[in-house]
Amino acid sequence: MGKRRKARQAEAMKRAKRKKIIFAAVCAAAVLITALIIFGSLRLSGTRTDEDGALDLTRLSLTMLSAEVNRITARPDNYIGQTIKMSGPYYAVYNNGLGHYQHFVAVKEVDSCCPFEGLEFIWNGDVSREAYPEPSTNVEVTGVFKAYEELGQTYYYLAVEDIIVLR
């Protein structure tokens, strides 16, 4: 009777060990699948491209657009040379230190309480205010992401060849 009992205990231990191994494998697979879903969706937001290979931000929801613009401005060197397409309200800000206007496509309508998020753009190398649409006009721009240095600071912008005024 002692031998049978020991054999049953040994068999039960083997089954328990197999169950633990299976459970660990299932958990590892679940973690891997979850990670792939999360990182895949994060990556997807940054890799939406149009037929020309431009990073197309025009198809993103406001939340995703804000996140993507934050990602671009947080790590701008990762985007140098990339073509980016963006739409939103146009705003111009006169920068006293630089002595010229900076032109932006904002993520959302600018209000008095909050600073806006957006990307600076320069249309055909012209920074004068006269060449651009009226402030708050909804525009779409496509340009190559570049950098310029002024007064010891690096500024990042889209070099844009055309502005499309949206209705």
Image (tube, rainbow, N blue to C red):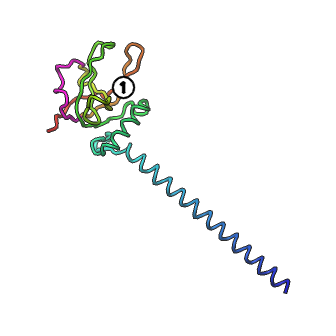
The residue wearing badge 1 is 156
Q: Counting other residues with Cα less than 10 Å from the Cα at mark 1, is it few (<14), some (14-19), or many (20 or more)?
A: some
Q: From the viewer's perspective, is residue 47 above or below residue 124?
A: below
**Prevailing secondary structure class for the magenta stretch in the rendered image:** loop
Q: Inspect the image, locate mark 1, and give the three-letter code of the amino acid beneath it.
A: Tyr
- Quadrant of the drawing holding the N terminus: bottom right
Q: Secondary structure at mark 1?
A: strand
Quarter-wise, where is residue 15 in the image?
bottom right
Q: Is residue 33 left or right of residue 155?
A: right
State the residue lying farthest toward the right.
2
Q: Is residue 45 left or right of residue 87?
A: right
Residue 104 spot, x, y in % from top left: 27, 28
Q: Which residues are magenta?
A: 127-140
Q: From the viewer's perspective, is residue 94 above or below residue 44?
A: above
State the residue lying farthest toward the front.
113
Of 94 and 124, nearer the camera is 94
Residue 49 part of the magenta segment: no
Residue 116 spot, x, y in % from top left: 31, 31
Residue 48 spot, x, y in % from top left: 34, 45
- Quadrant of the drawing holding the C terminus: top left
Residue displayed at 22% across by 36% down: 140
Of 143 and 8, nearer the camera is 8
State the residue lying farthest toward the bottom.
1
